[in-house]
Structures are given as structure tokens and as C-alpha cells.
Image: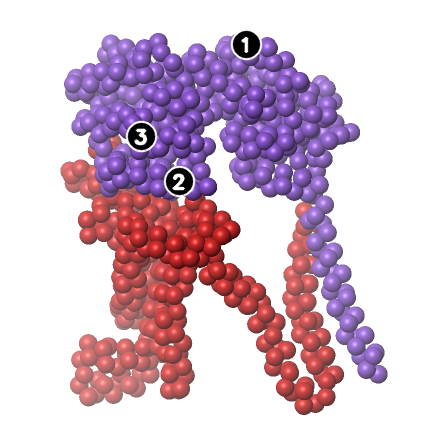
Chain colours: A red, B purple
Amino acid sequence: MLIKTINAVLAVIAGVGGALVLFWVLNRLVGLLPGRWEDRLKPYVYIGPAFLAISLYLIYPAIQTIHFSFANADSTAYVGLDNYTSLLGSAGFRSTLVNTLLWIVIVPAVTIALGLGIAVLADRLRPRAEKLAKTAIFLPMAISAVGAGTIWRFVYATNPPGEPQIGVQNAIVTGLGFDPVNWLQITDFKFNSLELMVMLLWAQVGFSMVLLSAAIKGVPADTLEAARIDGASERQIFRKVIVPQIRGTIITVFVTVTIGVMKLFDIVYVMTNGDFDTNVIGVQFFNELFTNFNNGHAAAIVVMLMIAIIPIMVYQVRQFRTEEAGR
Amino acid sequence: MRRTKLLQTLAPMTALALLSSGCLSDGGSTATSGTGTGNAGKTVEIMTGMTGDNLNALKVSLDPYAKEQGITIKWSPSDNFNQLIVTRVQGNNLPDIALFPQPGIMKDLAAKGRLAPLDDILDMPTLKNSMTAGTLEAGSKDGKLYGLMASMNVKSLVFYPKQAFESAGYEIPKSIPELLALTDKIRSAGKTPWCLGIESGPATGWPATDWMEELVLKYGGAAKYDDWINHKTKFDSPLVRRAAGTFEKIAFTDGNVLGGRKSISSNNFGTAGNPMFRNPPGCFMYKQGNFVAAKGFFPDDVVADIDNRVGVFGFPPATAGGDNPVEGGGDLAGLFSKDNEAAKKLLQYMATKDFGAAGAKTGAWLSPHKDFDVANYPTQTIQNIAKIAYQSTGIAFDGSDAMPGAVGSGSFWKGMTGWISNQQSLDQALKAIDDSWPAS
């Protein structure tokens, strides 16, 4: 135990110290060069290690993944586009794509709407009440997804009719004299997917609320005052004065949540593992890789996901740039 | 001048290299235990997938003997046994004895020559008389024994609420037609015959695969069951369809299952049987492995008074008195070196018919020996369960465990769940499972 602790401490010291020493050494080495070369090379010396690390841990695996997506299940022979055609050709995967799309359309928008609404309303409360309300709404952020799954299993749990219901919703439903409902198996209008989305909203609205609330508080009071003097209604002030000024934050939250939703895995895995037509591509990827041991399919899914995320990231970077330019 | 400057800069780098290598050397030293051969100090490392009460039962059974012989046992239990044993064999970092929870990997290792045959070490004629039918075959490869079953578990069990079942005058069915007739009889009396639940979080569906395996095994017998596990018989085949037909009759007929077909896939397997023990009973039969008759599954007050409240019978054969294999499993002990005297001694002891008497008394151990003294089991219920296995015509391992992961813990679970919850037809489910079978 003592040795392990000492080792851990040594590892931290060596890791942090090592990085410092490395930069110091490289700096000195470049310093040995004649003046002009020193100036030319120095920026690369500082950016180099980070760039190398990113290449090694991000770019290389990405290329390898693209490579494997054209190979068979155990990556021993090329199969061309077979992985893509067989995935896109299967009804199960297409339905998985539709579900994922539904998540992307619904969750970020609702997260923003709820977060914004709560932030605006909480802003009008007295300071203590505001703190309390915000803390309560932010609290689920502190719970891990698997923990959230455990909690929500008790919300949606279903026992046979006539048995005591341990699930909250079914306890209410049977308490009112109805038969228990198999919440997670209602596929009409993708209702069960919507129920899973509620879980993610529950967990994420706090995040959106905190960022948007900070942005709203940053809106200069004189602009609001000017609008009021000009006779604008509260609704007009919100739509035409506040929202345009916090647009950047809204987009950041929107993009972050969107990317998070595209990679969604844990909630669906814990609650249904994709059964009852609730599958999303994150879960499908996991099952292809760790249940089916099919590297080809798993890599093809990741490549499709990457391709889908790129436009969103480009949009965000552009947005970021125009905002920087506007400042 | 330049040179000294270079030296100054190089010195810390060297120091850093030394420091980091110092950190790593500590982790490496623990990996070289269990040398496979020799064992001069008479330490025997036993790897096992058993945990909790089962592991404890094994320890109390084996430790006293080892102590008497001056052998120290180094226990290496792991829930992740299958991955770990493969990695350790690849790295040539062998334990002395390994207890394999499933025969697949054990047979692979035997085929590669990594395990020692046990035929010369153990008293085979005595074992053949003593071991439950099918258990030696489960541990054999090419006619030689490589895995000795040390402990056993049984899946082909139907539990019932003893008093209510008997006072209603129901009789234990001796064949599947009789089981179906009993089901109809209970239902037409206005009661619910079965409890059935297959919900198990991300693993939802596995209890339904056990039902299918059970029926395929009873209808087809051990040989055809093996063909099915190896995909020589497809899922879309008369045998599997026959099994599915019987399951459909039991599970989907209105009034047969508590809560009906729609509640099966949301009802948790661990507690689905518990309405049996209400008064009047919510249902009269629940099929599940022997593990369920313990704390954490059946209600505590039932477990405390298990012999009076719980009855159990073996899932009946296709025809009364006919071939009656039983689905179950066990831990197969394999030896890595035939020159390892201490490990050999322990294995020889594990092959004796009385081995496990101490463990059996804890209630978490079933011996695979037919002539094991059942009085060692603490309850009548466990004695009955053991007898069901001892009287069978053979033990067959869980089929889905032996299938490739893509099927056994993937499409088979999902197919059954989809079919039961009416999201897909039986045809679609069987086809999807067949299609998911890996090509190689």
C-alpha cells in the first residue's frame, strides 16, 4: 500500500515534472541554434509535442478506423463497401438511424427551450429562491448515467397486473384503478424513445440552464432599460433584445448537446439495450464491437458517425470565428 | 562551452528516464506467479470463475485437505475468468489448476495441448460409475478427460408453491404433454399456471433462451442439441420450431402466464416467481435454475422455511420414462502440467465421491457424484434438486453460453425478446438469429 502510494506520487511528480523538463530541455536545445533559426523553430517546438500526442491518440486511430471499416469482422481481409451496404440494407439499422435522428431533432432543441425558460424565470425570483431552484434543477448533472438509469428504472418498472407495483408511474396508474402500463414497450409514435429522452433532458437541462443563465445575466442592463423606455413589452425584450445577445451561448449549448446525443450510449444501454425498437447507433456500435466482435461493422458505424458530426463541428467553428471577428 | 551546455540539458533527461523506469518495475514483478511446472514450495494456484458463496463452499471443501498435505493454495478467483485464462495462457503465465465454468475454452486449450489429460491420474473406472451421466463427456476432448467436473448446477427445474399445489391435488407431470395438460387444468380452474419473466437489464431475454434450450434438449436429445449449438442445425428448423411451438403454447395462451404475454419481457427474472408464494398463489409454476431458491430471489420468509413452502420437479422429458437429459452446468477442473505432484494430489482428492461434503453443508454446492451422500445437503429442496440431476440421462451445458457471443448473448436474446413482446414474428426472429451467426 505504502509502495503504491509512493509510486503514485512519484508518477504524478514525474509526469508533470517530466513535461516541464521536456519543454525546458527543448527550449534550451533550440536556444543553442543561431538566432534566426531559433525564432523560426521555437513555435513548432512548443506546439510539436501536443501535435504528436494528438496524432498518436486521435488521428492515427481515426485513420485506422476508416481503414478497418472496409475490412471483415476480424480485420483480416478487405470486403470493400460490404459493411456499409449490409448495415444500411438491414431494416434494424435503418430504424436505429431513424431513432438517432429523432434524438438529434428533439433533445437539443428541448434542452435549449427548457434551459432558457428556466433561466429567464429563475432570474425573476428572489436570490435565495433562485439559488434553490437552480440547485434542484442542476442536481441531476451530478448523477452518473448508470445511476440515472437505476433511478429511472424505478420510474418505469412494470410488474404484472395485480402485483404490487414498485415503479412510480405504474403505482400512480394502478392507484387510479387502471391496469399497469409497460412503459418501455410502447412503440406507438416512438413513445418509449421519448421516455428515454426525458431521462437525458432530466440530466442535461441543468447544464443548459447554468450556461444560459450566466449569459442572460451578462446582458447589459442599459439595453434592457432602453427597450423598456421605448415601450417594448417583456416578450419583445426577450425575443429581440436578450436572445440576440446570448446567441453565441445558445449555439454552443446546442452544438454540445447535439454531439452528446449523437454519441448517446449509456441511457439506452442501461434501460433497454436497444430492445423494443429503441436502438441508437451508440448502442449498436457497442454491440457490434463487444457482443458480435465485428470490427468491420463497428468501424463503419463510427465512420458514418464521424461524417455526420463534421458539418456540425464546421458550423460551430465558423460561428465561433464570426463571433470573434464581431468583438 | 557548447558541450557543457548540452551535458547540462541531457542530465535531467537521463534522470527522468531512470525515474520513470523505476515506477514501472514494481508493477511487473507480480505477474510471474504459478510457474506451471515444479512448484517446489508446494504452492498451488487455482484459478476459478466462482465467487461469493460458491467460492466459499469450494474453499471449505478443499482447504482442510490441502493443509493436511502441506500444500498452500493460492486462490485466484475472477468474474472475468474466460478472458483472463486466455490472456494468461497466451502469456505463458499459467495457474496450476483452473476451474472452467464452461467447456468451450477448456476444450480449445486441450486441443492446443496446454492441458494435461487426466485419465492416467484419476481412477477412471470408479469415476465412470460415480459421476452423473454426461459430466465426464462434457470435460472430454478426443476421448480423453481434460476437465473434471468439481461442482454442478441445474437449470431444468420447475418450482411450485408446495402446500397450494398439493392441496389442489395437482400431480407432478412426467412428460411434456402432461405438463401442458396440467397447465390447461390449472387455467380452466380459473387460476394462473405460470409465472414467467425475462427482464434482466441489458441482458434481457436470456431466461427465454433457457426455455428454448430446455425444449430443444428434451425434444432432440443431447446429440441434436449439440448440432444446434454448433449451428449444424439451424434455428429455422423443425426441431427449433417444435420447441418454439411448445413455448408459445405455454407462454402466449391467454390466462397461462401471470400478467399475460405482454408482461413477460418487463418482468424481472429474479423476482418473477415470487407471486407463487402469496395466498392464494399468483401462479403455480416457475421454471428457473437452482440459484433462484436462495436469498435475494425468493422472498426471505420463503427461503427461511424452504422445505415446507417450495416444491421442485425436473422439467419433464418429451415422453414419460423416455430419454431425459437435464440442462445444467458445472466447473471443470483442468490441470496444466502432469508433473505437478501437488496439483495432481488436489485433483485426485477432488475426484473422490465425498469431496465437497463440507461445501454442501453451506447450501451453495452440488456434487456431480451420483453416490454423493445427499444427507450432506442442508435442505430437502437441495436434495431434491441434486436427485433430479443424478437421475437424469445426461447433463447438457447451457447452449447459449456455448454459441458465439454474437448469437448466444446477442441475437438469441434479442430475437426471443422481440418475439415475446410481439415486435417481430417467430419467422423474423429465427431468420435474424440464423443470419447473425458469424461466417467463420
| Amino acid type indicated by mark 1 | Asn
Q: Residue furthest bottom?
A: A36
Cβ–Cβ below 8 Å for labels 1 and 3?
Answer: no
Q: Earlier in the sequence, mark 1 or mark 2?
A: 1
Q: Quadrant of residue B404?
A: top left
Residue B138 picture location, percent across and down:
51, 23
State the quadrant of the C terminus of chain A.
bottom left
Which of the two residues, A313 or A293, is positioned nearer the viewer here?
A: A293
Lower sequence index among marks 1 and 3: 1
Disc sitting over residue B195 in the figure: none
Disc 1: which chain? B
Q: Is residue B346 left or right of residue B192?
A: right
Vertical side of B436 occupied by A205: above or below = below
Q: Secondary structure at mark 3?
A: loop
The structure residue drawn at horizontal position 34% and vertical position 16%, both measured from the top left corner, is B317
Q: Residue at x 71, y 18 (%)?
A: B68
- Residue picked out by circle 1: B129
From the image, tell me which residue sits under label 2. Answer: B437
Residue A57, visible in the rendered structure? yes
Dot 3 corresponds to which residue?
B237
Q: x and y percent of residue A114 in the render?
A: 27, 64
Circles 1 and 2 on the same chain? yes
User: Mark 2 or mark 3, which is nearer the start of the sequence?
Assistant: 3
Q: Nearer the viewer, mark 1 or mark 3?
A: 3
What is the three-letter code of the residue carrying label 3?
Answer: Ser
Q: Residues within 10 Å of mark 3 (few under 14, many from 20)?
A: few
- The chain ID associated with circle 3 is B
Chain bearing tag 2 is B
Q: Position of residue B119 (x, y in %)?
A: 63, 18
What is the distance, in whole Å, between disc 3 and disc 2 at their CAs?
Answer: 15 Å
Amino acid type at image mark 2: Trp
